[in-house]
Amino acid sequence: MGRTLAEKVWDDHVVRRAEGEPDLLFIDLHLLHEVTSPQAFDGLRLAGRKVRRTDLTIATEDHNTPTLDIDKPIADPVSRVQLETLRRNAAEFGVRIHSLGDVEQGVVHVVGPQLGLTQPGTTVVCGDSHTSTHGAFGALAFGIGTSQVEHVLATQTLPLAPFRTMAITVEGELPEGVTAKDLILAIIAKIGTGGGQGYVLEYRGSAIRSLSMEARMTICNMSIEAGARAGMIAPDDTTFDYLKGRPHAPEGEDWDAAVAYWRTLATDEDAVFDAEVFIDAASLTPFVTWGTNPGQGAPLGANVPNPEDFEDPQERIAAENALKYMGLEAGTPLREVPVDAVFVGSCTNGRIEDLRAAADILDGRRVAEGVRMLVVPGSVRVALQAVEEGLDKVFTAAGAEWRHAGCSMCLGMNPDQLAPGERCASTSNRNFEGRQGKGGRTHLVSPQVAAATAVLGHLASPADLSDRVAVEA
Ligand SMILES: CC(C)[C@H](C(=O)O)[C@@H](O)C(=O)O
Ligand code: SF4
């Protein structure tokens, strides 16, 4: 019987298989950041172990890094200790690190792909749930816990429980103005935040094949929000074009051999998935969340739902609680929900294409009075590219704040936070209570919706904008 993409990558990495035991897999790439690595390094130190493969291990600072005044000492003592600890550990164990101020610094899931470290058919792990992002390249990539981080540091392998496979097939063309973010929000609303549990998702179909690498990363990034172990997309010419010439991509004959192998990875015609979901791309519209988990979303044109309309009692209670926390009334058109802040950034939507999309809408327009807009590039490289294209000027001319790279207001581990009760349209991936600041309210949106919302001051799509007005001096 044929095999799926995930099964092929898995099989090619098994270093030990024994009856009744989880397979032991070789790990090709181990990414580290400051939040989940300290105890893992402590464990190594205590056991007198080294990092087994420093050549396959790379660290970057992202969660705790400030996005302003990066030349000054870090004011928050907790953040400072986190970052100093990572630097010390990297130095002691010989691990490559991209610290604040380094040109390769940025959110770990933006940095790996842009360096060409994330490659088709590889196994990628990181002590971070959004490691699923890397599956956009046809890598088997998953978030791991801190004890697993220690295991990988020590052995470059990981014992892993078997998984099930789910195909999410999206056929047709996404309508104008509908993005990868809208698609993944719609998928999660459909299958639920637990719908992917135990599964590796494979996104396929003509709508997926037509997406850029950035858009594919947006989709795979949020697989974890459906509870999945990982999300993958078969590598194709789009993938190879993105990778070619990147610092860690193979070259010359090695490149040709790699591409030949990568082409064999696609799911076989006769492979069978454990579960299948079908989505018609043409039926989608811009999508926003109204609740406090990423599955609580609806088309922008809909109203805030009435909890009583949910048949499932648990969903009903969750919706009631969410509306209370979010300060929303059932029946209110989502388009009428006003915002205080807009955040464009994160490993979901902080890549160059995302910034271009937001800038395109803001060009010649102004952020609404009373709305604070933060634009935080996913990495320094993204920032440099944006500056080269003049996007930073577009943002600042519109009244948005152009910041330094990092996770920033995606989770507010640095000073970029919402005040209690503030409402934000955010291009990130989680709308949990308090995530962007205690009492803060998050609506997950695409960069396009974020920009239109910033201009109009309420949840909106670019289609709601009237003709452009000249930027006031
Ligand atoms: C801090 C880290 C462990 C966490 C994650 O695992 O995803 C963070 O990146 C997040 O997005 O919530
Ligand atoms: S940008 Fe957000 S989701 Fe991504 S790693 Fe940072 S905190 Fe997690």
Image (tube, rainbow, N blue to C red):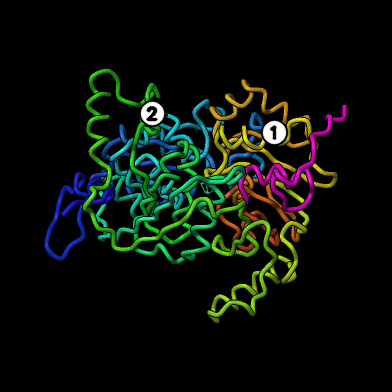
Query: Magenta part of the protein: which range?
Result: 445-473
Disc 2 versus disc 1: nearer the observer:
2
Q: Amino acid at mark 2?
A: Leu
Q: Is residue 289 above or below residue 176?
A: below
Q: Which is nearer the eye, 99 or 217?
A: 217
Q: Which is nearer the eye, 310 or 244?
A: 310
Q: Is residue 386 left or right of residue 159?
A: right
Residue 138, x across and y down, in percent: 34, 42
Q: Which is nearer the eye, 113 or 216?
A: 216
Q: Amino acid at mark 1?
A: Trp
Badge 2 marks a residue whose secondary structure is helix
Residue 348, x across and y down, in percent: 53, 45
Q: Would you say the beta carbon of the disc 2 residue lies within 8 angstroms of ligand 2?
A: no
Residue 1, x across and y down, in percent: 15, 54
Residue corresponding to mark 1: 402
Q: What residue do we see at 62% from left, 77% from top? A: 309
- Residue density around tag 2, few if under 14, some if 14–19, many if 20 or more, within 10 Å: many
Q: Would you say the beta carbon of the disc 1 residue lies within 8 angstroms of ligand 2?
A: no
Between the C-alphas of marks 2 and 1, the distance is 28 Å
Residue 468 covered by magenta stretch: yes
Badge 1 marks a residue whose secondary structure is strand
Give me the disc on residue 243.
Answer: 2
Q: What residue do we see at 53% from left, 57% from top? A: 186
* Visible residue check, residue 354: yes
Q: What residue do we see at 60% from left, 58% from top? A: 431
Most extreme residue toward the top is 252
Q: Is residue 164 left or right of residue 191?
A: left
- Between discs 2 and 1, the one toward the N terminus: 2
Q: What residue do we see at 55% from left, 48% from top? A: 181
Report which quarter residue 277 is drawn in. Answer: bottom left
Q: Are marks 2 and 1 in contact (CB under 8 Å)?
A: no
